Amino acid sequence: EPADLGTILGVWAHPDDEAYLMAGTAMLALAHGSTVACVTATAGEAGETADEATWPQRCLAEIRRGEMAASLAIIGIADHELWHLPDGDLADLDGDRGPGLVLRALERLQPDTILTFGADGMTGHPDHVAVGDWAVAAVRQSGRATRVLAATKEPAWYDEFPDITEMVFPIGGPETAPIDITLRVDLPDNVVDRKLDALRAQASQTTGLLQLMGVAAYRQWLRTEYWVER
């Protein structure tokens, strides 16, 4: 159960990674009294927007910082670090810089569990891959028995919405057989509603997909979170 994860640290690349992948797990853990913190490597300034007129690219870093703050407040995560690293270039940073930043967070928070990306980066995004690798490297350097869980999906999750899956995961996403899933978190309706609100708060990134899918399908798409050991 999420409450069994102890103190949790989310390690992510861009604003909205945490809302899509760990929001429900975090809310359930927080409800049981667990400590949950999050670090985000970039402000997401290189991302795309749902509407350039509403969310102009030149202002995107500032916009997404504000959106993420509002989203994290809905989730209930008060302990958050934004590192302002260059969006899109994380894989090209000096080899020790990224792991060093995660290590510093590990030393401060002493988490029992890190939630992050797997080696596939979920969507194959190089920033996602880099950040997940940093987390693994930092735990090794720390010598701590911190557990690293990577976001994943079951094959059936992709099959439920094939058109959306093809759009969001054009090169394919991680598929883990149910028997190999470490933790499957099926969110109750009230938690799904809060997760939806947290994602709506990041409107520059989520409005287009929400309009395309409709609220009912989008809620169903969000309602299960899967984790596997790294």
Image (spheres, rainbow, N blue to C red):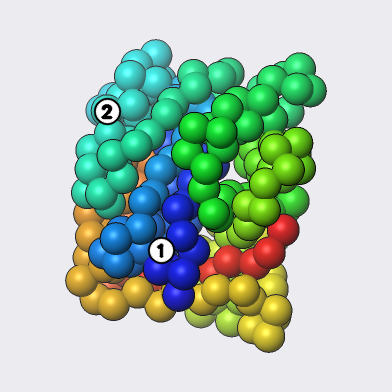
Residue 216 shown left or right of residue 14 in the figure: left
Which of marks 1 and 2 precedes in the sequence?
A: 1
Q: Residues within 10 Å of mark 2 (few under 14, many from 20)?
A: some
Q: Is residue 123 in view from this perspective?
A: no
Measured from the top left, where is residue 211 in percent x and y?
30, 56
Measured from the top left, where is residue 187 in percent x and y?
35, 74
Quadrant of res 148: bottom right
Query: From what the image shows, is residue 89 above or below residue 216?
Result: above
Measured from the top left, where is residue 133 in percent x and y?
73, 41
Label 2 with label 1: CB-CB less than 8 Å: no
The answer to which of 62 and 210 lies nearer the viewer is: 62
Question: Which residue is under mark 2?
Answer: 66
Identity, as a three-letter code, of the amino acid under mark 2? Gly
Q: Residue furthest top?
A: 58
The answer to which of 14 and 105 lies nearer the viewer is: 105
Secondary element under disc 2, as helix, strand or loop, is helix
Residue 33 shown left or right of residue 94 in the figure: left
Q: Residue furthest bottom?
A: 179
Tell us which disc is closer to us: 2 or 1. Answer: 1
Residue at position x 24%, y 76% in the image? 189
Question: Which residue is under mark 1?
Answer: 25
The answer to which of 70 and 107 lies nearer the viewer is: 107
Measured from the top left, where is residue 25 in percent x and y?
41, 63
